[in-house]
Image (cartoon, rainbow, N blue to C red):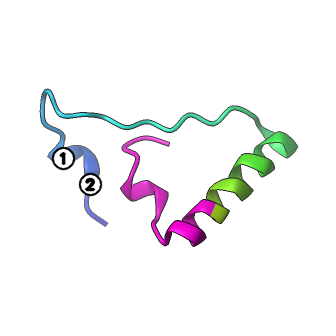
Amino acid sequence: MEDKFAKFEKGKKITILSIDGGGIRGIIPGTILAFLESKLQVIMIYIYILI
């Protein structure tokens, strides 16, 4: 897999996905992300620079 940060250009838009919750509380956002990936047929790491 190529390094996404190697192509970072100054002034380019950066997308960051921040998920709060750890342990059992992290299961719900993870499940939602998996659901969105399957419905949108896209992998989130290709949309967001930092998750």
Left or right side of 41 for 4: left
Q: Which residue is mark 2?
A: 3
Q: Position of residue 37 (x, y in %)?
A: 55, 65
Q: Which mark is residue 33?
A: none
Left or right side of 48 for 26: right
How crowded pointer 2 is (Cα within 10 Å; few <14, some 14-19, many 20+) is rated as few
> Residue at 87% of width from left, 45% of height from top?
24
> Residue at 79% of width from left, 49% of height from top?
28
Left or right side of 25 for 34: left
Q: Position of residue 14 (x, y in %)?
A: 30, 34
Q: Quadrant of residue 10?
A: top left
Q: Amino acid at mark 2?
A: Asp
Asked if the magenta segment contains residue 49, the reply would be yes
> Extreme right residue here?
24
Q: Position of residue 22 (x, y in %)?
A: 77, 37
> Residue at 66% of width from left, 64% of height from top?
35
* Magenta-colored span: 36-51
Q: Amino acid at mark 1?
A: Ala
How crowded pointer 1 is (Cα within 10 Å; few <14, some 14-19, many 20+) is rated as few
C-beta proximity under 8 Å, tags 2 and 1: yes
> Residue at 26% of width from left, 54% of height from top?
3
Kindly report the distance in space between the C-alpha atoms of the residues bearing marks 2 and 1.
Answer: 6 Å
Asked if the magenta segment contains residue 44, the reply would be yes
